Amino acid sequence: MKNPIEPLELSAPLARRLAPQLCRKDPATGENCAWCHGLWQYLRLMRLAATPGHQVDFYRRAFQSVTGGNGAPRVLVSGAADYSMLALALAIHRERGLEPVITVVDECDTPLFLNRWYAERASASVECSRSDILEYASATPFDVVCTHSFLVQFSPDERIRLLAKWRELLRPGGTVITVTRVRAAAGTERVRFSPEQAQAFRATVLRQAEAMRALLQVDPDELAQEADIYMSRQRPWPVRSREEVQQLFEDCGFRVDELSDAPRAAAAGERPEGPAVPGSGERVQVIATRL
Ligand SMILES: C[S@@+](CC[C@H](N)C(=O)[O-])C[C@H]1O[C@@H](n2cnc3c(N)ncnc32)[C@H](O)[C@@H]1O
């Protein structure tokens, strides 16, 4: 299956303009997350952001094993930088003649705005809920929780709470579908772009933004400055091995049905390395059943 059509060139300027107003302020630091949500879709246009669309075949296979009570599954998108997971879930189900019932939960209003915007264009009815997923509750259980690069948003201790929450939100027999990066060489602290990676990433942003100037319609220097801020704040918690993923799910009441290596995103010229960069590092694909 091809990637679903995502009108990034229309929504990227919306996200960049609205993120400073809509993005959630971290109560501890007072900073908001516009550094990520405002730039993310431009990074995607420049092929510098890892999204579910890089593992289409996996998500397609995984969703095919999911069933809902009356045929249309209840799907929870747990954290989404934009509408890419929604677009993929909709396209895969519609291909099978199913209209899934989708809820998107994120703690920030900017991705929820983008999900509503996409849902309207796709004539889909999607519920969007602003909540820390750890606090989120639903009266009706879900058939599937899907997400991408979400485990690394949580420290190892918080991850146990996240899995307990997903378990609570799923019906028995329900499924978690996710992709996560694994970093064998990482320590226990959050990871960040190294100075060399940051330099290469910045140079690529400048080069791509110049080459795509007509499409992006943003000054390449401005995007490079925003990329500097993005790189200084993009600090995921490492997941260090497949075994760690397996253990986490099993300890939290899931059976792991698939734990496979994600194919590397196809190289498009020179690509830098670093957190959330497609094609950088190893990623694993996980399908797990709630026991
Ligand atoms: C899903 S992840 C990584 C992005 C992913 N590669 C994608 O394409 O969607 C990032 C999202 O998780 C959200 N997030 C982080 N921690 C969260 C939490 N505790 N509860 C809800 N959303 C959270 C952030 O606001 C962000 O939009």
Image (spheres, rainbow, N blue to C red):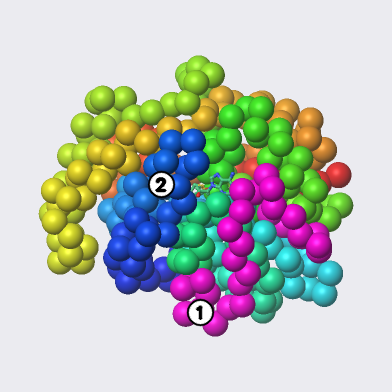
Tell us which disc is closer to us: 2 or 1: 2
What number of labels is visible?
Answer: 2
Residue drawn at (41%, 68%) of the image: 6
* Along the viewing direction, whichever of 137 and 151 lies nearer the viewer: 137
Q: Secondary structure at mark 2?
A: loop
Residue, disc 2 = 32
Instruction: Give percent across and percent down for residue 39.
Output: 32, 53
Asked whether mark 2 and ligand 1 are closer than 8 Å, the reply comes as no
Residue drawn at (32%, 37%) of the image: 231
Q: Residues within 10 Å of mark 1 (few under 14, many from 20)?
A: few
Eyeballing the image, is 137 above or below 155?
below
Residue drawn at (51%, 71%) of the image: 116
Residue drawn at (50%, 21%) of the image: 189
* 12 sits left or right of 210 in the view: right
Residue, disc 1 = 120
Tell me the quadrant of the picture where the C terminus can be found. Answer: top right
Eyeballing the image, is 158 above or below 110?
above
Eyeballing the image, is 163 above or below 58?
above
Instruction: Give percent across and percent down for residue 3.
Output: 46, 64
Q: Can the viewer see residue 256 in this picture?
A: no
Instruction: Give percent across and percent down for residue 96.
Output: 66, 74
Q: Secondary structure at mark 1?
A: helix
Q: Which residues are magenta?
A: 116-145
Location of residue 95 (image quadrant): bottom right
Kindly report the distance in space between the C-alpha atoms of the residues bearing marks 2 and 1: 26 Å
Please tell me whether residue 135 belongs to the stretch shown in magenta: yes
